[in-house]
Amino acid sequence: MTTHPTTGLSGPTPTATVSVKPLVLNAPRRGEDLHVRVTAPITGTSLPVVLFAHGFGSNLDGYAPLVDHWASGGFVVIQATHLDSKRLALPADDPRRPHLWRYRVQDMRRVLDEITTLEAAVPGLSGRVDRGRVVATGHSFGGQTAGILVGLRVRDPRTGAVEDLSDARVMASVQLATAGKGGDELTPFARDHFPWLRDQDFSHITAPGLVVAGDKDDLPLSTRGPAWTADPYTLSRGDKSLLTVVGGEHFLGGISGYRSAETTDENPDRVALVQQVTLAYLRHVTGIDHTDWKNARTVLTGGHPLGRLESK
């Protein structure tokens, strides 16, 4: 076990990892094959799975500060490149664009359906994955994807239909800097460019979850300011926790990549806080170990310069 000198939070001693990409899954109705990356520790058995959905425009190579940390802490982390990725450069008039939110959920379901194939494609991983312990995670747009897998209801902007697209194979979620309730709180920009945010219902989410929000994350999507990204915590039910990152903007200090140019609030200590709290939560919710999560709840109850942690 190690303790970070700035955050004061404890964590497991990191183990070496291996990462394999791209693993290609056939997806004929998607219009593009699904490219996947798997990162896993080189030792250990009964390893739980973390599905990670990237933010709008990113890809399977993003978010290494989180992915590497989680894998070194005992998880098989699976990332896909979703259709909104800049790498795919869908034309503005592509008929798939209004359904990007739905394609993302289908991507995650396809990954779960093909997890045996993915496991076999990573040298030394076969037989070491616990498919019964799966946590959905995501940043920004990816947080909505993770939320849908545990019960978030989204009104289809084209049909007006509201469906339950949750997946019983997912036991919990971690949502980072994720959109809140829609309706009149959305800005005209959000209504025009992200119509799938217009009507989100968090009340059906009962699975355990951790929400991470920056108190300076003032997105141009809502008139409510940074408090908007705490909605997945305040408006959902069940066993939930909220980590508020002090001074954190949308990339929470730099979680989207090492030396990432898109980070507006670069701060290694903020990244360390998010790394350690999310790993502690993942280990807690999957039953690996509860010690680091209990420590985080004690250390971050109030007055910590980097963040505060609350639960309900």
Image: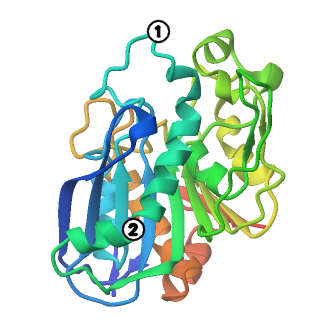
Assign a secondary structure to mark 2: helix
Quarter of the image for residue 90 reads top left
Outermost residue on the front side: it is 28
Can you identify the residue that label 1 sits on? 93
Q: Which mark is residue 115?
A: 2
Q: Nearer the viewer, residue 2 or 202?
A: 202
Query: In terms of secondary structure, where does tag 1 sit?
Result: loop
Query: Can residue 216 be seen in this snapshot?
Result: no
For this view, does 302 lie left or right of residue 238?
A: left
Residue drawn at (35%, 79%) of the image: 74
Location of residue 118 in the rendering, given as x and y in whole percent from the top left corner: 30, 66
Residue type at numbered disc 1: Asp
Q: How is the image coloured?
A: rainbow
Q: CA distance from mark 1 to mark 2?
A: 33 Å
Q: On the rendered image, what quadrant is the N terminus found in?
A: bottom left
The residue shown at (41%, 52%) is 270
Relative vertical location of residue 276 with respect to residue 133 in this rendering, above or below: above
- Residues at badges 1 and 2 in contact (C-beta under 8 Å)? no
Amino acid of disc 2: Ile
Q: In the image, 296: left or right of 38? A: right
Left or right of residue 206: residue 299: left
> Up-down: is 115 above or below 61?
below
Percent of width and height locating residue 164: 75, 50
- Residue at 32 percent across and 26 percent down: it is 86
Question: Residue 221's mark?
Answer: none
Q: Quadrant of residue 85?
A: top left
Left-right relation of 21 to 312:
left
